[in-house]
Image (tube, helix red, strand yellow):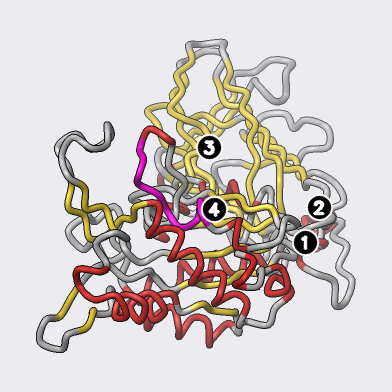
Amino acid sequence: MIGLCAGFSLLFATILIPGQALAERQLAVPLRFDFGPGNVADGYTQVTAKDVYTPERGYGFTDLSKVNEEDRGGSDAIRSDFVRVQGSSFVVNLPPADYTLSLIAGDTAGNTDITVKAESIVKVEPTAKTAGQFVEAGFELALIDGQLELYFSGNEAKINALVITPKDARTAGEHPSVYLAGDSTVQTYKSAMKPQAGWGQKIAPFFTDEPIFVNRSIGGRSTKTFLVQGRLDDILRNIRPGDYLLIQFGHNDAAINNQERYVSPADYKVYLKTYIQGAIQRGATPVLITPVGRRDYDAASVSFRISFPEYVQAMKETASETNVALVDLSRLSVAYYDTLGLEGTLPLFLHLEPGVYPAFPDGVKDDTHFQEYGAEQIARLVAQGIRELNIPLSSYVQAEDSQ
């Protein structure tokens, strides 16, 4: 944690035991901030439009040119004054952990229009209030990087108060949960989409009954969009010590024509390390899984090509740099395709004739996504890869003759 001034550090009352997991390093008391130049509520730290962030202070605004303040007067120390923010961030140094945040935003004499992002995730949707009305919003956040960033925007973003409360540390369950973070090749599909399936929805039968698989994968996401849409945050706010996080991305990260999704190989490594760090902080074990191969055949070499090779390499480098387990699904899937040949891989992928399935009335020729049979075979490869890792989760993989 970045150094704080003595006065502010007392607010943290942080319990730091040598060797203790980051997930167990908790604030003992909430942090309470009262924004504005007027009277300060009891038990709160005042924040004015002059409070720029410095490492020594440990909190403050990043750009004071976009911040001003007003005091309407009155007996309510919280609601009678505010700081107005026009597109700037308020940051607070905090230990990586899980928090509940409560925000009051409004003005007794004017309108309020505010949107709040926490760690790039929209936590308060655009909200408008008239004079005398106040936004009272609460949300949870899994903090990873040791510095909370709240970005305020809107036509009249007026902040009255902020309370940051640490959540209780979670304990391990009787059996591990296995969370899956990935894209459309991993996700679980509704029955109406049959026969399309992702390998994540087919993996449980390759394990004993003890692990609980929680598939949070969703189509069209890259490491970046999965994070900024709050999907990683949702996992980290639920994952427990002894659990696992399986991470497979790359298909959408490589979509250079879609700048919302696109992530360069270098940034891909940065995002992957965020996933890894978040899981480890909470006592869980991350496992990287290189992106499953597409049906990309090279007739000249009579073999299938590695899909997204730059991202496969970047993930391998990340695993090495962080000492995190990796299943090379890219290699395993392409080697499996090679045993089947070009025509033999058709039953794996979404190659369907018209009029057979209601979800695909016109038929489809898709060399990326899987039919149920293909998803099962890829799940089998993932399970085999996990068994070879020699981690505690490996012991739950069933023998091949029982699968």
Q: Is residue 242 left or right of residue 63?
A: right
Location of residue 368 by image quarter: bottom left
Is the residue under label 1 in contact with that under label 4 (CB below 8 Å)?
Answer: no
The residue nearer to you, when weighing 315 against 359, is 359
Amino acid on which disc 3 is placed:
Lys
**Residue that protrudes farthest toward the left in the picture:** 300
> Disc 4 versus disc 3: distance between alpha carbons?
14 Å
For residue 63, say whether it is visible: no
**Residue that protrudes farthest toward the front in the picture:** 401
Residue 107 placed where, x, y %? 55, 19
Mark 4 sits on what residue? 232
Give the residues in magenta: 193-202
Amino acid on which disc 2 is placed:
Arg
Q: Residue at x 76, y 64 (%)?
A: 242
**In front of the other: label 3 or label 2?**
2
Location of residue 298 by image quarter: bottom left
Amino acid on which disc 4 is placed:
Leu
Mark 3 sits on what residue? 123
Is the residue under label 1 in contact with that under label 2 (CB below 8 Å)?
Answer: yes
Mark 2 sits on what residue? 170
Residue 95 placed where, x, y %? 72, 61
The residue nearer to you, when weighing 16 against 201, is 201
Q: Residue at x 48, y 69 (%)?
A: 272
Q: Looking at the image, tell me whether mark 3 or mark 2 is earlier in sequence order.
A: 3
Q: Secondary structure at mark 4?
A: helix
Q: Is residue 175 left or right of residue 99?
A: right
> Disc 2 versus disc 1: distance between alpha carbons?
7 Å
Q: Looking at the image, tell me whether mark 1 or mark 3 is earlier in sequence order.
A: 3
Image quarter of the N terminus: bottom right
Mark 1 sits on what residue? 241
